[in-house]
Image: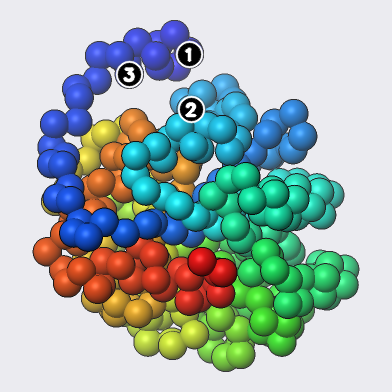
């Protein structure tokens, strides 16, 4: 598909008419976005997307704090936790330095960060030790659902040792995984009881799952949620929609509701996953308002925990 064909298809796509406006929360409260991506392609190299693909056409340019401010306007997103963007390994320190400077500036909502790291790399212990007790860096992530990475990789003793060390430093580790490998990641969690884990994107519950796959995902989510050192992030799975805006609230509800049920109200956090969420929505507000609508009948206290309070507590945010 050429860029012209893609844009033409987008222009003729039906508008999202299935998304009712979320009821206003009373009283309104601020939102902490625990999954904010930013990248400046003039500074950083992202080897994980091809700008020639349809996804690359959406994501293949810079997304900076300026664009984030526009994307979240009117949604009361007052604070954000930056999530690493899988830069090439040689730029990991540069990415960390960049985001720490942004957090310390106080000029944007970004107030904390989860930075990139490779727990099985030879210099990992030295690299992460600098973040012990850090004011802004709260955790580490390595995306594990990429080609070439199998359970043998992240269950290797060297990788496990690196994850255990994070716990010793008071740092968390984000699990960004294939849904079929949730049981294998539960094995990793079991070997690292002193480390806190965040399961990104509802365990990547896929909107294109068959009924059998969905049932297996539900079973595996319930199992990993039994580990009390794991929290669930209600984020980015909407990127698995068969196309931008090609979903309904009924499509989202089973993934959201099951995640909230198995983790409980005290171990869930909202994440925008912008701009990657744009693979499934036209704009950030579509995802945020869909989630608000889906949880609107839950007690207000639980809504506040999901959108704000749990993130403040988990990351120790000074707000």
For this rendering, which residue is in front, 224 or 65?
A: 65
Disc 1 is placed on an element classified as helix
Disc 3 is placed on an element classified as helix
Label 1 belongs to which residue?
3
Which mark's residue is nearer the viewer, 1 or 2? Answer: 2
Label 3 belongs to which residue?
10
Give the Cα separation between the discs numbered 2 and 3: 11 Å
Scheme of colours in the image: rainbow
Q: Is residue 243 above or below residue 209?
A: above
Do residues under tags 1 and 2 come within 8 Å of each other at their CB atoms?
no
For this rendering, which residue is in front, 93 or 3?
A: 93
Rate crowding at label 2 as few (under 14), some (14 to 19) or many (20 or more) other CA atoms within 10 Å. Answer: some
Residue 28, quarter of picture: bottom left
* Residue 216 appears anywhere in the view: no
Disc 2 is placed on an element classified as helix
Give the Cα separation between the discs numbered 1 and 3: 11 Å
Residue 233, quarter of picture: bottom left
Considering only order in the chain, which callout, 2 or 1, is on the residue closer to the N terminus? 1
Q: Is residue 43 above or below residue 83?
A: above
Label 2 belongs to which residue?
58
Rate crowding at label 3 as few (under 14), some (14 to 19) or many (20 or more) other CA atoms within 10 Å. Answer: some
* Residue 172 appears anywhere in the view: yes
Query: For the point 70% across and 49% down, which residue is it?
Result: 105
For this rendering, which residue is in front, 126 or 214?
A: 126
């Amino acid at each position: 598909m050429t860029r012209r064909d893609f844009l033409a298809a987008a222009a003729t796509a039906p508008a999202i008419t299935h998304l009712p406006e979320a009821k206003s929360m009373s009283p309104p409260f601020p939102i902490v976005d625990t999954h904010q991506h930013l990248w400046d392609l003039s500074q950083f190299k992202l080897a994980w997307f091809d700008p020639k693909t349809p996804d690359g056409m959406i994501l293949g340019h810079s997304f900076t704090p300026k664009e984030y401010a526009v994307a979240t306007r009117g949604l009361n997103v007052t604070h954000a936790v930056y999530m690493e963007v899988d830069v090439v390994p040689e730029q990991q320190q540069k990415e960390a330095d960049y985001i720490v400077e942004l957090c310390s500036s106080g000029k944007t909502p970004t107030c904390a960060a989860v930075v990139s790291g490779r727990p099985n790399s030879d210099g990992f212990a030295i690299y992460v030790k600098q973040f012990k007790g850090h004011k802004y860096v709260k955790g580490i992530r390595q995306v594990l659902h990429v080609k070439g990475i199998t359970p043998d990789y992240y269950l290797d003793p060297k990788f496990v040792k690196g994850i255990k060390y994070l716990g010793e430093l008071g740092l968390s580790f984000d699990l960004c995984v294939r849904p079929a490998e949730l049981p294998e990641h539960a094995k990793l969690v079991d070997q690292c009881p002193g480390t806190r884990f965040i399961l990104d994107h509802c365990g990547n519950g896929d909107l294109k799952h068959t009924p059998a796959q969905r049932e297996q995902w539900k079973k595996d989510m319930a199992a990993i949620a039994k580990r009390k050192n794991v929290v669930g992030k209600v984020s980015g799975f909407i990127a698995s929609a068969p196309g931008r805006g090609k979903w309904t609230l009924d499509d989202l509800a089973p993934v959201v509701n099951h995640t909230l049920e198995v983790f409980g109200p005290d171990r869930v956090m909202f994440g925008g996953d912008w701009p990657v969420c744009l693979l499934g929505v036209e704009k950030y507000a579509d995802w945020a308002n869909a989630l608000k609508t889906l949880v609107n009948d839950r007690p207000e206290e639980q809504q506040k925990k999901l959108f704000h309070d749990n993130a403040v507590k988990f990351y120790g945010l000074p707000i």
